[in-house]
Amino acid sequence: MIMLTRINQSSLYERCPRLVKNLTALGNVKAGSGIDPSLIHLVKLRVSQINHCCFCQHMHSAEARKDGELQERLDVLPAWQEAPCFSQKERAALAWAEALTLISNSVTDAIYQQTVEALGEEGLIELTTVILAINSWNRVAVSLQFSPDMQSAQA
């Protein structure tokens, strides 16, 4: 099977700079929203896992570790519902992230209410923008087959 060469990352960004500008802006949360960087890392990583985006999983797990996230928590993120190491706020955010990513499964009133109770309406709105942005980034990276630099992982 012959693999078709797709648009590479740098070419896409040069040819469509508004993509980077707009998706980056969409994913930025307002100060004071209650959405801290560690929560954003968990949400971006979990959504990227669901979407099978190797590029974003690699990037966001590295960013999370750099910002102090424990590898042990990253290891069990796909099983967050069973893992006792996640707070109620993190659980609510992850449930919201999964519901919005797997939208055809419906966003239930229970998930909505749980998220509003944990984050407030402003936090839910801000988190929603992060989820929209990472889902969009995942679709770009997966469809164009962006590949992370894995040389450090091969050592």
Image: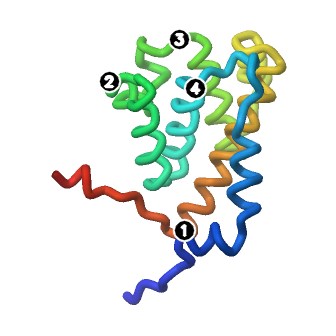
Q: Position of residue 53 (x, y in %)?
A: 49, 54
Q: Earlier in the sequence, mark 4 or mark 3?
A: 4
For disc 2, the marked residue is: 72
Q: Residue at x 72, y 44 (%)?
A: 132
Q: Position of residue 90 (x, y in %)?
A: 57, 19
Mark 1 or 2, closer to the camera? 1
Q: Residue at x 42, y 13 (%)?
A: 85
User: At numbered mark 4, what does the secondary structure look like: helix, strand or loop?
Assistant: helix
Q: Earlier in the sequence, mark 1 or mark 3?
A: 1
Q: Residue at x 48, y 65 (%)?
A: 146
Mark 4 or 3, closer to the camera? 4
88 and 9: which is toward the camera: 9
For disc 4, the marked residue is: 37
Q: Position of residue 88 (x, y in %)?
A: 58, 11
- Report the quarter where the N terminus lies: bottom left
Callouts 1 and 2 close, C-beta under 8 Å: no
Q: Quadrant of residue 19?
A: bottom right
Mark 2 or 4, closer to the camera? 4
User: At numbered mark 1, what does the secondary structure look like: helix, strand or loop?
Assistant: helix
Report the amino acid beneath label 4: Pro
Q: Mark 1: give few (<14), some (14-19) or many (20+) Cα within 10 Å.
A: some
Q: Earlier in the sequence, mark 2 or mark 4?
A: 4
Q: Mark 3: give few (<14), some (14-19) or many (20+) Cα within 10 Å.
A: few
How far is disc 2 from disc 3 in space, using C-alphas?
A: 15 Å
**Looking at the image, residue 115 lies above or below residue 95:** above
Q: Residue at x 42, y 63 (%)?
A: 147
Report the amino acid beneath label 3: Ser
How far is disc 4 from disc 1 in space, using C-alphas?
A: 25 Å
92 and 12: which is toward the camera: 12
How far is disc 1 from disc 3 in space, using C-alphas?
A: 36 Å
- Tag on residue 87? 3
For disc 1, the marked residue is: 9
